[in-house]
Image: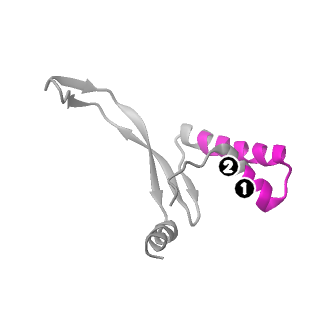
Amino acid sequence: MSGSTITRADLSEAVYEEVGLSRNESAELVEAVLDEISSALVAGDSVKISSFGSFSVRHKGERVGRNPKTGEEVPILPRRVLVFRASHVLKQKINQADHG
């Protein structure tokens, strides 16, 4: 595995090659999909992509953390975090890639 990072441009290029839209249309399609996912998550909705996984926002309450250097207690404010759970299909593909 190369260890590289897939970018929006890479996704757009893949859509261009696979679907046959123009490069501009491919880029717009990728942007539209990512915007739709982002908007749903900001609104507090979950996003499930069949055979890939699901994204959801989890609420974490306030808690006390500790500065690892000084040992000083520091309050950690409540926040929302993004959670991704891979589907069984994606997990199988990842594990097959390791063994095949």
The quarter of the picture where residue 65 lies is top left
Question: Magenta residues?
Answer: 13-38
* Image side of residue 13 versus residue 34, left or right: right
> What amino acid is found at the position of numbered circle 1 in the picture?
Ala
Q: How many labels were placed on the picture?
A: 2
As drawn, the label of residue 14 is 1
* Image side of residue 21 versus residue 76, left or right: right
* Image side of residue 38 versus residue 14, left or right: left
Tell me residue 48's x, y (percent).
56, 57
Tell me residue 28's x, y (percent).
77, 43
Is-magenta flag for residue 24?
yes
**Label 1 secondary element:** helix
User: Residue at (68%, 50%) from the top-left corner?
Assistant: 11
96 relative to 48, above or below: below
**Label 2 secondary element:** helix
As drawn, the label of residue 86 is none
Q: Which residue is mark 2?
A: 10
* Image side of residue 8 versus residue 25, left or right: left
> What amino acid is found at the position of numbered circle 2 in the picture?
Asp
Tell me residue 34's x, y (percent).
65, 44
Q: What coloring was used for the rendering? A: one colour
Question: In the displayed image of the protein, which residue is found farthest to the bottom?
Answer: 100
Label 1, label 2: how many angstroms apart (C-alpha)? 6 Å
User: Residue at (48%, 67%) from the top-left corner?
Assistant: 94
Question: Is mark 1 in CB contact (under 8 Å) with mark 2?
Answer: yes
Question: In the displayed image of the protein, which residue is found farthest to the front?
Answer: 2
Tell me residue 83's x, y (percent).
44, 48
